[in-house]
Amino acid sequence: MLTMLWRQTATGLRVLIAFTILCGIVYPLVVYGVGQIPGLAAKSAGSIVYAANGTPAGSSLIGVDPVAANPAADPYFHTRPSASSSDPLGPADTSTSGGSNLSGFNQKLLDLVNQRRELIAQREGVNPALVPADAVTASGSGLDPDISPAYAALQVPRIARVTGLSENTVRGLVAHATSGRILGFLGEPTVNVTTLNQELQEAQR
Amino acid sequence: MSDTLAGILQIVALLLLLALVYKPLGDYMAHIFTTDKHWRVEKALYRLLRVDPDAEQRWTTYAMGVLGFSFVGVVLLYLMQRLQAFLPMAFGHGGVTPSTAFNTAISFVTNTNWQSYVPETTLGNTVQMAGLTVQNVLSATVGIAVAIALIRGFIRHSTDRLGNFWVDLTRGVIRLMLPLSFVFAIILIATGVVMSLHSGVTVTGVDGAQHTLPLAPAASQESIKELGTNGGGIFNANSAHPFENPNALSDFIEIFLLLVIPVCLTRTFGTMVRSTRQGLVLVSVMGVIWLTFVTLAWLAETHPNGPATVAAGAAMEGKEVRLGIPSSILFGISTTGTSTGAINGQLDSFTGGAGGLAMTNILFGEVAPGGTGTGLYGILVIAIIGVFLAGLMVGRTPEYLGKKLGRVQVTMASISILTMPALVLVGAGLAIALPSTLGSMGNSGEHGFSEVLYAYASAGNNNGSAFGGLTVTSDFFQVTLGLAMLFGRFVPILAVLALAGSLAKQKRVEAGAGTLPTEGAMFGVLVGGTLILVAALTFFPALALGPIAEALS
């Protein structure tokens, strides 16, 4: 029995080394190589969006909340809250990812939700009851690039007021950053905050 | 389109797609493991590795192959993590601590992919690719090999040979896992999944703030993570992370991938035993359980009872907007019914009902439709117990697929079934008895208990998902959860291979008037009933203290 175990283990070691080369080096590097062809390369590299001057400004897949220099004149669309921020509504810590893992019965989560609702209602100058669910809850990744169309619409009047653009122009930008369900039935309608803020900034030039 | 209709269409599309590939993929897998012909590249490999591909093994040799191979897998993965500082593309990450490296090595070799570390800040590319991606492929294929050996036990007679583990493994990797992983890795890149060898990219946002976004060779690992029912994320947020799961289409593809092999293996089984209806019965049982759990969890998640969720207006805590509630439920139930354990939303923040159903799905022994291979042998063991119980009722020697189920067979089936509950209940009980556990919980009360129970359920069943609020970095959790994964994987494998060996030795018995028919709906009800009976008798008290209490409050 022991000799058999020993012999099988020795074979196992040889097989493991061969498959480590095949599955751990050859396979990922070939996938990487194919990922470099045009059409895939930008996606492989993280769907980076660039500012007008050519510097990387973010990823269209990653949402990090922008912070207004003057909170009284806040010119940005805001993402959902991130569990990696120590503030109820602060920007995510991008070195990690994850959710709050707080349950619906957790007092801490109840307090956070109420606090966020008040802060957002104040910022937008609206009735707290109008703030949608995605605005007051932290995402699963902490890096959710999207908000619901309802949360985007809630922010339009403030953006228009602060930036001096007409509400119609801002609504047009939101519409441009909005995606419906894929194939009509997969997922949810979304507004991409990263690309929206980028386009908003360009519209102000 | 209403949310409900869109969600239903998504489920229908998923089922249609699985039905479409059921026969071709199932039959292809049967072909892989029955043909006499070796591919040229395989022959070269066998020569190089000094394996005689035409030498068949007894169940004991086959089992030693599985154990020896997994042992060297654990050792290599442990050493790679410990010596990470000396490996290329480590990006300044040093060696992983001994307890985390121990836990992670076992976790990936046992197909659990439980993660007690933050990948972004712990692992570089070499450990991810040459360590973790490799075990994603291999552990999944080992599971399939064991299931195939069990099928051979049924279809062979008067022999002590079950096939050759090294041949089954090699063919599984070269003819099935690698080609499919490759194709779907490219498809996933096309949907937006990253595939980068850089550690990260620094960006300057509209507000002028600089952030570094971690990158990773994600696509090659993502496809096998789902296809092999592994579940370990290359990022901490797993498939909730936009770089792993950028949109609802990638999400749909990932759910399809993690279901496709376990589902089609029932066809492989049916084809190999020369009665595809035998496979259809099993897949129907799996499907009914899956659909029931999806429906109930979806209902629970859209009718939240937690005060915080009610105050927010919807159960969106821990979920991504692009995926929403239906896709998160579909993903959560599909990954807990398989041994995947990937998440696209934080299960700890699910409602008590939906989170409890995810946990119950695991505690059913992951057979709806189960992990790659593990799901099939799991439900076959349940079927054996079912046939045995039916035999007791009418006072006849039970037989299944032309084999008598005597003392040896029922003993092995029982060992295979009872190992997991013992690990889960003893492990969770021990942890709860420790005063320090209270400080590790992320939530209090019933939900805190659920976090601990879930951890041992996940480890004992090699699932890998978590109620992530529980801090599991203490040596106690690292070691006990590591042991639960180890025994939860290999005790049932040994029992199943012993069972296969004992079945292959028997002569075939022809079906007689007293033989229980195992091709129809009645047998499906018997298998499903046995499954529910075993799980309910074992876990109802524990579940009542956690998720049931929460769902009813």
Image (spheres, coloured by chain):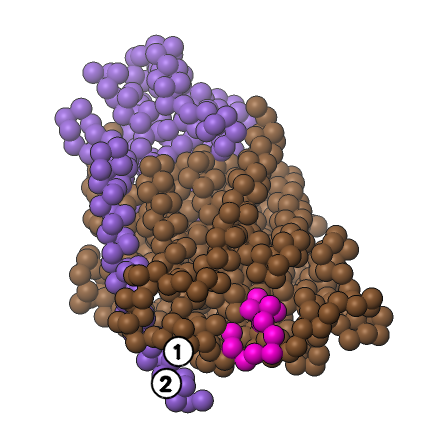
The residue lying toward the viewer, choosing from B68 and B246, is B68
Q: Is residue B521 visible?
A: yes
Residue that mark 2 sits on: A6
| Secondary element at tag 1 | helix
Asked whether the residues under the numbered discs 1 and 2 touch, taking CB atoms below 8 Å apart as contact, a structural biologist would say yes
Q: Which residue is mark 1?
A: B68
Q: Position of residue B24 (x, y in %)?
A: 51, 47
**Residue, far bottom:** A2
Q: Is residue B7 left or right of residue B53?
A: right
Residue B346, relative to residue B81: is it above or below?
Answer: above
Identify the chain of the residue marked 2, using the numbered disc in the image: A
Q: Farthest residue in the front direction?
A: B37
Q: Quadrant of the N terminus of chain B?
A: top right
Q: How many marks?
A: 2
The residue closer to the viewer here, B475 or B338, is B338
Amino acid identity at mark 1? Gly
Q: Position of residue B421 (x, y in %)?
A: 61, 70
C-alpha span from label 1 to label 2: 8 Å
**In the image, which residues are magenta?**
B151-162
The residue at 71%/73% (across/down) is B509
Whether residue B308 is visible, yes or no, is no
Residue under the image location 64 percent in, 57 percent down? B275
Residue at the spot x=33%, y=24% of the render?
Answer: A196
Q: Nearer the viewer, residue A136 or B229?
A: B229
Q: Residue at x 39, y 56 (%)?
A: B175
